[in-house]
Image (spheres, rainbow, N blue to C red):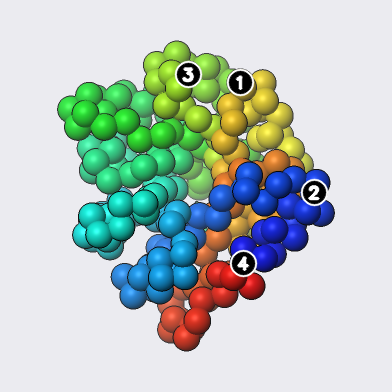
């Protein structure tokens, strides 16, 4: 995976160290995470806060360099746990959640980095701020959270070409002077890198199919 990311960076005229691999370990057991940690992987992504807490609370104590990214749609009643646990919260997508996160950060005395998630395909079943509201919402979050708001995240529609969506998100981040672009998954991370992704969130291409058994060695280096 790291070698393929390096190759995609080279092809795009970018430096490999500018793209961070976030290993998406949702539904995988703690053994899979330990195997990835042993292979040098430090950034992990989870889409459910409670599952993340069950898996990572202890691991974060024993591995202080581990960075946990919360990448799933977030309910306001999980904001407190998300702030306690997450190093990066990638799914800030509505004013009520901004309120809940601000409150949780004050109570916890902890400030995770924040990404605004944009529903780039305007799909009704997906989380993310609608495209048309993105500029206004991002500006309001920048005002409220200052430098803690570092970038944007998206999950383009499963069907069709993701490239125009990645290009749109990159242009939006540039408008707001945001450095972090979390985009690209197993099927499209190379395209995302070509469009400026700084973080790719890869699950199945590392860990295999989500219900299946863990491969003997994880293809992190390849
Ligand atoms: C599951 C998930 C991923 C990883 O998807 P793969 O196709 O397994 O690489 C990335 N981002 C989000 C938000 C996810 O929920």
Q: Mark 1 CB in 8 Å range of ligand 1?
A: no
Query: Mark 4 highlights which residue?
Result: 1
Query: Mark 1 highlights which residue?
Result: 176
Picture quadrant of residue 11 = bottom right
| Label 4 secondary element | loop
N-term mark: 2 or 3: 2
Query: Mark 2 highlights which residue?
Result: 12
Could you tell me if the residues under marks 2 and 3 are in contact, i.e. CB atoms within 8 Å?
Answer: no
N-term mark: 2 or 4: 4
Closer mark to the observer between disc 4 and disc 1: 4
Say whether residue 159 is visible.
no
Could you tell me if the residues under marks 1 and 3 are in contact, i.e. CB atoms within 8 Å?
Answer: yes
Q: Crowding at label 4, few (<14), some or many (≥20) Cα neighbours within 10 Å?
A: some
Query: Mark 3 highlights which residue?
Result: 142
Picture quadrant of residue 99 = top left
N-term mark: 2 or 1: 2
Q: Mark 4 CB in 8 Å range of ligand 1?
A: no
State the residue in front, 125 or 17: 17
Q: In the image, residue 28 lies at what x, y percent?
A: 38, 70
**Residue at 34% across, 75% down:** 31
């Amino acid at each position: 995976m790291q070698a393929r990311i390096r190759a995609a960076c080279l092809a795009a005229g970018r430096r490999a160290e500018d793209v961070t691999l976030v290993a998406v370990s949702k539904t995988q057991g703690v053994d899979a995470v330990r195997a990835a940690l042993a292979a040098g992987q430090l950034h992990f992504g989870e889409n459910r806060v409670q599952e993340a807490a069950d898996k990572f609370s202890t691991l974060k104590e024993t591995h202080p360099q581990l960075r946990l990214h919360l990448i799933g749609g977030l309910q306001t009643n999980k904001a407190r746990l998300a702030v306690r646990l997450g190093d990066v919260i990638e799914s800030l997508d509505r004013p009520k959640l901004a309120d809940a996160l601000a409150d949780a950060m004050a109570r916890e005395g902890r400030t995770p980095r924040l990404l605004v998630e944009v529903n780039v395909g305007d799909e009704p079943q997906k989380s993310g701020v609608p495209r048309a509201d993105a500029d206004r919402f991002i500006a309001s979050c920048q005002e409220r959270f200052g430098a803690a708001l570092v970038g944007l995240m998206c999950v383009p529609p499963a069907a069709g070409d993701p490239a125009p969506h990645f290009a749109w998100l990159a242009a939006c981040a540039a408008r707001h002077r945001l450095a972090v672009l979390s985009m690209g998954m197993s099927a499209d991370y190379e395209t995302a890198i070509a469009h400026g992704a700084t973080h790719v969130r890869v699950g199945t291409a590392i860990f295999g199919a989500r219900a299946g058994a863990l491969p003997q060695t994880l293809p992190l280096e390849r």
